[in-house]
Image: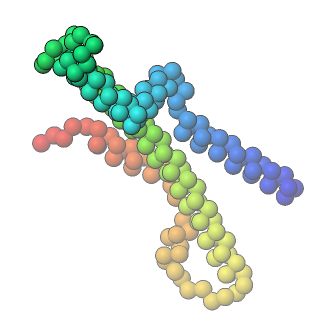
Amino acid sequence: MAKEKDMTKKSENQQSEQEIKSYLDFNTSKADQIAGFITDILGSMVFLIACMLLFVTWICWNLDFFSFLKPFDPFPFPILEMGVSLFAIVLSVSVLINQKRQGKIDKIRGQVEFEVNVRAENEITKMLNMLHEIHQRMGLDSKQDEELEAMKEQIDIKQIHQVLDEMESNNSTPDQP
């Protein structure tokens, strides 16, 4: 019987671990995968060095440093300026996309952390209750400890969620004078 309980407990723990992993693995849509790929490329040192080499080559070419190549974008480099401006737009949008993705990740991590903390709090409360019962059964003199009694109380998750929802709704509404 105890073995069956242990097996059930292990399968429940594995299931909850899988649920947590599924929460953290949200890159399932093609758009998220493409955004991650673009962010990884644009945010790399290799990409920065490649851009710098391209710009230096472009400028040297068009300042006629390479006598065997004919300049196509004379100083003040209007084609290069337009290309860099368009690239800046793409880069700024990719930064915003990455910030949005990071916000999702942070929100999911916060939810997982909250769930883990609640589970730990429930386990600690149960251990305190068990320890107090052992103390009483052994007949040891136990003083009335108000702090211990407060710690032994079960946490009301619904109340915590309600408070968090109220705080979130208050933060999402604009400040009114």
Determine the image quadrant of residue 58.
top left
Q: Is residue 166 left or right of residue 159?
A: left
Query: Where 4 falls versus 77 (above or below)?
Result: below
Q: Nearer the viewer, residue 89 or 23?
A: 89
The residue at the point 67 percent across, 81 percent down is 135
In the picture, residue 71 is in which quadrant?
top left
Q: Is residue 85 above or below residue 140?
A: above
Taking the image as shown, residue 34 lies to the left or right of residue 61, namely right
Q: Residue at x 50, y 51 (%)?
A: 113
Labels in figure, total = 0
Q: Is residue 88 above or below residue 103?
A: above
Query: Residue 39: x and y, percent?
Result: 41, 30
Residue 36 appears left or right of 137: left
Residue ID at (34%, 33%): 48
Residue at the far front in the pictured view: 67
Residue found at the far bottom of this picture:
141
Q: Residue at x 79, y 55 (%)?
A: 6
The N terminus - image quarter: bottom right
Above or below 90: residue 168: below
Is residue 109 visible in this depiction of the protein?
yes
Specify the quadrant that holds the C terminus.
top left
Image coordinates of residue 83 in percent, x first then y, are 25, 17
**Where in the figure is residue 117, as x and y percent of width and height?**
53, 56
Residue 39 visible here: no
106 displayed left or right of 175 = right
**Closer to the camera in the image, 111 or 125:** 111
**Residue in the foreground of this view, choosing between 93 and 61:** 61
- Residue 37, percent across and down? 47, 27
The colour scheme is rainbow
